[in-house]
């Protein structure tokens, strides 16, 4: 099952803390990923900077999660 099945349950724009909680990591990891470009060993998802606020778009989060999907041979 992918997160795309639950689009309605995720806000259209998430704060860093909300995104971190969604994927079960500490918010500091997201802060670091904005500098390094990597999160959990993969290219970090895009973010939006509005003044000093950082936000993540739902569709970017879903795409980032779906890219990590691994098909298992039966």
Image (tube, rainbow, N blue to C red):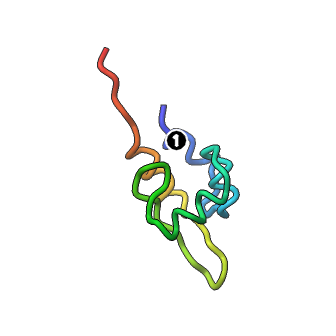
Residue lying furthest top = 74
Mark 1, residue position: 3
Vertical position of residue 14 compared to residue 4: above or below: below
Could you say where residue 26 lies in the image, as x and y percent from the top left?
Answer: 67, 52
Give the number of callouts. 1
Residue lying furthest bottom = 51
Left or right: residue 43 versus residue 52 is left
Could you say where residue 29 lies in the image, as x and y percent from the top left?
Answer: 60, 57
Q: Residues within 10 Å of mark 1 (few under 14, many from 20)?
A: few
Residue in the picture at 60% in, 48% down? 8
Residue in the picture at 40% in, 57% down? 43
Quadrant in the picture for the C terminus: top left
Could you say where residue 25 lies in the image, as x and y percent from the top left?
Answer: 63, 48
* Residue 38 position by quadrant: bottom left
Residue in the picture at 51% in, 39% down? 5
* Residue 18 position by quadrant: bottom right
Could you say where residue 4 lies in the image, as x and y percent from the top left?
Answer: 49, 43
Front-most of 56 and 41? 41
Residue in the picture at 54% in, 57% down? 58
Left or right: residue 53 versus residue 57 is right
Assign a secondary structure to mark 1.
helix
Left or right: residue 30 versus residue 18 is left
Residue lying furthest left = 73
């Amino acid at each position: 099952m992918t997160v795309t099945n639950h689009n309605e349950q995720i806000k259209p724009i998430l704060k860093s803390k909300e995104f971190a909680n969604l994927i079960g990591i500490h918010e500091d990891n997201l802060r670091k990923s904005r500098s390094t470009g990597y999160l959990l060993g993969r290219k970090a998802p895009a973010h939006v900077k509005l003044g000093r606020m950082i936000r993540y778009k739902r569709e970017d989060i879903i795409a980032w999660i779906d890219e990590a999907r691994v098909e298992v041979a039966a």
